[in-house]
Image (cartoon, rainbow, N blue to C red):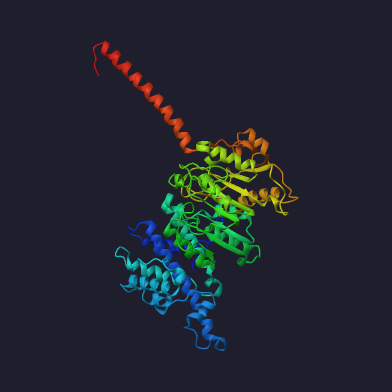
Amino acid sequence: MAKQNKKSNGANVGFEETLWAAADKMRNNMDSGEYKHVVLGLIFLKYISDSFEEVYEKIKNDKEHYDGQEEDKDAYLAENVFWVPQDARWEYIKVNAKKPEIGKILDDAMIAIEKDNPILKGVLAKNYARTDLDKVRLGELIDLMSTIGLGDKESRSKDVLGRVYEYFLGRFASAEGKGGGEFFTPQSVVKLLVGMLEPYKGRVYDPCCGSGGMFVQSEKFVEAHSGQTHDLAIYGQESNPTTWRLCKMNLAIRGIEGNLGPYNADSFQNDLHKDLKADFILANPPFNISDWGGERLKDDVRWKYGVPPAGNANYAWIQHMIHHLAPTGIAGYVLANGSLSSNTSGEGEIRKNLIKKGLVDCIVAMPSQLFYTTQIPACLWFVSRDRYDHKFRNRHDEILFIDARKMGTMVTRKNRELTNEDIQKIAGAYHAWRIVNGKYENVKGFCKAAKISEVEKNGFVLTPGRYVGSDYVEEDDGVFEEKMAILTKELSGQFKQSKELEDRIRKNLKSIGFNI
């Protein structure tokens, strides 16, 4: 395996970069959105085949308990691994990697795996025989991927392929720009959300789960703190069918059991978990979406604090998540900064109602350039019902504001990451304020616990810079629609003045004998 270097967020990258470079050569003219399923499907096939082979050797060598059962499908189900038919096992794929028909062999392998494992039905990519996919490059990628899992048992662990899968998700998201955000939230943002919520035990829900990054990081958090991952129950929903399949594969690679519903579906129009009351909700909803079908949901039971505008789903997401919170639940999610101050179509009234009910726990202003999807400034909202849990002090008359806009480190020319130190500082301030007897102190320019009365005096605007005393000049209190209304009005006036000036010049020129 290639020498591995360290990135600022702790991810190992040497081998992943080598694999990415090899895979990228195979792309040719394929659209990145299609191409990622080809590559990620191969990684998934390698993972389930490795897991199968490990159990196969165990069964084959354990004559006392499994005499002659190495080809018995039920024996593998008992070991909680996917059954892989002979013509779909990686060894068979590797032997045939150089054949011109390798594309069809892979498609047949995926079909066979889905047939024998109903939970994967409709999940795997089956487009390897396509004519525009370079079969020579495909064979080379299979050869390179075959080196994953060789050597000691630790290097064969699910985490190696899981890490490769996660790395590729990030690279594809970066390559696809705005479209990439539909399936991937930057890892440092997910780590911060998880670090602040600390989902040790209970039901974890993401109503727009993308490729499942929130779930993966929640399980990692539990493992890092010596907890039991089976104490978490995972619930998710995703509207995009291809992204839903990515999530199913990502969870399977990690060995995470999750209820994503029987199919992809829109959380607003077809809530697949209507009765769910979650202990933790983590989400990165799409920013400012206007075509969410709000006009068909005016009387929905979820709009307890006000009907969200049909032209922007931000406050629909907020109330959807509050609706699904358990009595002591807490939610953390990403939204555009406009959600902190907008008064468009009743959003200000909804925000006031949430604040007065004591639901808004903490607001974090985030640095720019964290997301592949957009350069719109973003923030984190934390909405909580855990104020009545004995572990946490009653915070119903306060909101914690954290200004983290100066944090983070540029890792590429376009993108920034929060460092582990940044995450610890932000999460540490939140926990010190949140828990009973926590040693919290306001820090000018960084954090302040503001009384609801102070927020009311500020018109229920939740922009952290207003409260922490920040000298940071990049303030973005408005939303796009409001700013554009002001700008277009100004531009209209300037056009009018320009026309008047043009007419005056024409008139003056004509008076001295020059017509234009």
Residue furthest to the right: 437
Residue 189 in view, yes or no: yes
**Quadrant of the rendered structure where residue 328 is?**
bottom right
Q: How many marks?
A: 0
Task: Name the one closer to the observer, 267 or 298.
Answer: 298
Considering every residue shown, the one lying at the far top of the view is: 512
Q: Locate residue 444 relative to residue 244 in the image: left or right.
A: right
Q: Residue at x 48, y 34 (%)?
A: 482
Residue 107: x %, y % from top left: 36, 70
How far across and how far down the image is residue 317, in percent? 52, 48
Q: Residue at x 29, y 17 (%)?
A: 506
**Is 496 left, or right, of 82 in this rendering?**
left
Q: Nearer the viewer, residue 295 or 289?
A: 295
Residue at 43% of width from left, 27% of height from top?
Answer: 490
Could you tell me if residue 6 is visible in this image? no
Q: Where is residue 296 shown, x and y percent of the image? A: 45, 47
Q: Nearer the viewer, residue 345 or 299?
A: 299
Instruction: Work out which quarter of the rendered image holds the C terminus and state it.
Output: top left
Image coords of residue 144 (percent x, y):
42, 69
Query: Between 262 and 83, which is closer to the camera in this rendering?
Result: 262
Rendered position, 83 above or below 496: below
